[in-house]
Image (cartoon, rainbow, N blue to C red):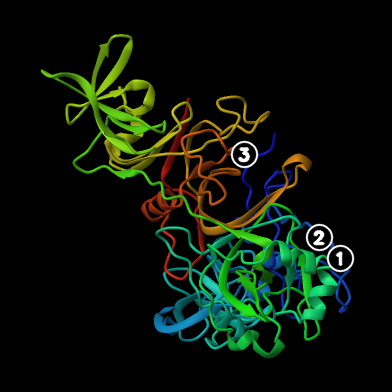
Amino acid sequence: MPPPCSGYPSFARRGSPCSVLRFAARTAPGFLLAAALAACEPAADPPMPAPRMRVDLPLAFGLDEAIADGVDAGDPRDAEPPGSDEAETITDERLASIATETSIYELPRWGSRRVGYMRAGGTVRRARIPATAGPRCPEGWYRVEPRGYVCVGAMATLDLAHPVVLASTRRPRLDDLPYPYVISRFPPPPLYARLPAYRDQLRFEPDLAEHLVKVSGVAAGFPPLDAIPAWLADGHAAPSLGNRWHGADRVILDHARPRSGFALLTTVDHAGRRFGVDTGLEVLPLDRTQPVVASTFSGIVLGDVTLPIAFVKTRGAYRVIDDPQGIRPGALLGFREAVAVTDETRTIGSVEYLVAKDGTLIPAHQLVVIKPFRHLPAWSADDGKWIDVSIPKQTLVAYEGVTPVYATLVSTGIGGTADPKETHATVQGAFKIYEKHTTVTMDGHETADSFDLRDVPFVQYFNEGYALHAAYWHDDFGHLHSHGCVNLAPRDAAWLFRWTDPHVPEGWHAVMIKSGGTIVYVHD
């Protein structure tokens, strides 16, 4: 079975059940970069449902722009060496992304290794003048902070008042879910290019009258309404992120697939109906979705408390007090609550109890216990960061050398400890994180398990398509659940994302490295 969580980070993993589709087309005529939902149709609105096209990117770092341009990766015309010190010195002036992805390259030329990318609306500090320019980047390659070069043109701009920048000003949070999220209902929503007139809603939603009766009064859980922004007012189409279907007369872009998830930049009221604008600047009716209620679960920072530690795995768990007055019930414990325990056990009657550090007893069957390693792995000796994932226990512990610093519950692949090539199991072994994405879209094409989850948060790839990432579509942490990735509650994923190496620089959306990332050790 192919890798489980391919999300089009630096390249598409062909054959993966979770390969990614997304917008990333050049806005200039004739330049189409690998895209998510793009399709090549005439200017008229497409038929319903709109066709979809999957695009597999080349299996190489940094070749996306070069191949999109029809240029050999080694084209010398854009390979001039960096210029003066002024072209290399970072200033307070900024450069902005105006595409789904704006690649950042190690050197100022197409075909150089891609070291990261920016997301539409993101900005970074830059050099005042370009390091070089050429036929394939006439506006110039600018050095950006803290490293790398960006080609200004179809994917990036120096104009911080560009329509895409203004439309995408909302930046992702880094301490919980990055955005408000919604999940599609059935039938899934249309994806409009603009706030649609009522006649257009009837055209593309033939069940509209019946549907609005069904959902009348259903608005709980959605983000608060914003004022309609100027770029969307008076019938204006949302700015394009390279989607060729956008245009002055375009009304609809596509229809979402069943089991789709969307991250929202804004929500507005239009003629008495609530609409959202997602990060792809698509407009969708929110009454055809349901809001995501983020998991409130999170693990524990280990400071004065250290291993062993336990998490309550059953509801209705309780402490037991054993003192001279006898055995009696104590305080109730919350579901998945972290409890400091000792190595001591005690059997009373036929029940085995763990002794908590406060002296109370807790029935052992109500807990999953994380114990210290008997023999720590060799890499712990150098004080570096590493992550331990136990498939049988469904736990994760973050270490700094020999010191555990964070512990939580996770959801690994539903295949358990079986062969990941044959089942949805998580791959076992010791790996290093080599790509980190603030968010990335994942989808699956298996007939019985199709999905399209946009903006999966805090994705950290450690082996092929296997990653640590937040899951906003379930709250089953502590149990097998995923297609093979290590699912985390949003707050846990955010904490790990900030803690692990490599660090994602300010203004970047993702970073890629050749070596040196945090170790991830997955085992049975």
Residue bearing mark 1: 48
Residue 144 locus on image (x, y percent): 47, 74
> Could you tell me residue 223's position as x and y percent?
52, 68
From this view, report whether residue 72 is shown above or below residue 313: below
**Of helix, strand and loop, which one carries label 3?**
loop
Q: Which residue is mark 3?
A: 483
Numbered disc in front, either 3 or 1: 1
**What distance separates the C-alpha of mark 2 from that of mark 1?**
11 Å
- Label 1: state its secondary structure: loop
Quarter holding residue 86: bottom left
Q: CA distance from mark 3 to mark 2?
A: 23 Å
**Residue at image coords 47%, 58%:** 177
The residue positioned 38% from the left and 46% from the top of the image is: 298
Identify which amino acid the numbered label 2 is placed on.
Arg
Q: What is the CA distance from the residue labelled 3 to the residue labelled 1?
A: 31 Å
- Dots 2 and 1: beta carbons under 8 Å? no
Secondary structure found at label 2: loop
Is residue 74 in view from this perspective? no
Task: Tell whether 8 sits left or right of 188.
Answer: left
Dot 2 surroundings within 10 Å: few (below 14), some, or many (20 or more)? some
The structure residue drawn at horizontal position 47% and vertical position 26%, both measured from the top left corner, is 392
On-image quarter of the N terminus: top right
Q: 402 above or below 15? A: above
Q: Position of residue 85 (x, y in %)?
A: 42, 81
What's under tag 1, amino acid-wise?
Met
Residue tagged 2 = 52
Viewer-closest of 434 and 284: 284
Task: Using the image as rendered, state which of residue 177 and residue 211 is in the foreground.
Answer: 211
